[in-house]
Each structure stands twice: as C-alpha cells, then as structure tokens.
Image: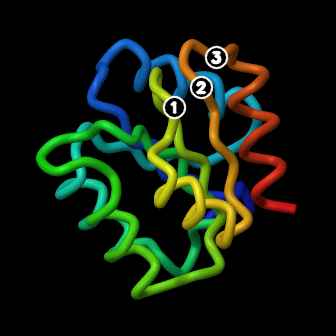
Amino acid sequence: MSDAPTVLVVDDEPQLLRLLIRVFEKRGFRVLSAPDAESAAQLFEQHHVELVAALLDVVIPPAGVEPLLSRMLALRDDVGIVLTSGDALPSLLQERLGALGGVFLRKPFSPGAAHAALLEVMA
C-alpha cells in the first residue's frame, strides 16, 4: 500500500467525478470513487481503515447522503467529511456536519477549493 492519503469521492455527475479524481490524484491522493450511495458504502466498508476523508455529494442516489453518512460513521467517526451541493444544506444535516467538524462546499466550486476543503477536514 502506498503512503498517499486515501480519500473517497462520491458524486452522481460523471464529469465532476472524473475531474475530482484527476485533481486529487495530481495532488498526491489515492482516490476511491463511486457514483451512488450503495457503491460508496461498499468501498467505505472495504477501505475504512485507510480512508482519511470523504467528499460526498448530498444528492446521490438512491436516498441522498444521510443514510450513507450513517453507515460510514457506524464504522468510523473520525474520517474527515466534506459535503457538496448546489443547494443550501438542510439545517439538521448542517448541524450534523458541524458536530463532525466537516466542511460544506457549495457547487459550483473550483478544484482548489475542493482540495482546500479536504485538507481542512484532514487537519
């Protein structure tokens, strides 16, 4: 296994997912990616030991990010969480993210902002 920090990126927009993978890999991360919550949960369960952070789209099939977040946190509650959305976060999700020390990134965002958000939740 490499020394590169491993991150999980989840978004149902294929172009954005590819862009984020390229951006993070160029900046030295090992990237696991998924287009939906079920695939993401499986990846998280397989790799939760080495994951340092996750960048998750709020609106992902089939039921949004909250069930995925619950499954992830049941295994590990110390993974850095970045949530992304084109809309404002619902207040309960905003409170939950705050309690986790996570970051909300409003779409559209720059590659640099995504990288900065990951570094912030990893600190």
Label 1 – label 2 distance at C-alpha: 7 Å
Please name whichever residue, 2 or 81, is drawn nearer the observer in this view of the structure: 81
Name the residue carrying label 1: 88
In this rendering, the label closer to the viewer, 1 or 2? 1
Using the image, tell me which numbered label, if any, was put on residue 60.
none
Check the picture and name the quadrant holding the C terminus. Answer: bottom right
Q: Residues within 10 Å of mark 1 (few under 14, many from 20)?
A: few
Name the residue carrying label 2: 106
Residue 72, given in percent of the width and then of the height, sits at: 40, 74
Please name whichever residue, 51 or 11, is drawn nearer the observer in this view of the structure: 11
Residue 12, above or below 72:
above
Q: Is residue 4 left or right of residue 46?
A: right
Q: Residues within 10 Å of mark 3 (few under 14, many from 20)?
A: few
Asked which secondary structure carries label 2, the reply is: strand
Q: Quadrant of residue 116?
A: top right
Name the residue carrying label 3: 109
Label 2 – label 3 distance at C-alpha: 6 Å
Q: Are marks 1 and 2 in contact (CB under 8 Å)?
A: yes
Asked which secondary structure carries label 3, the reply is: loop
Q: Residue at x 24, y 66 (%)?
A: 42
Q: Residue at x 30, y 19 (%)?
A: 14
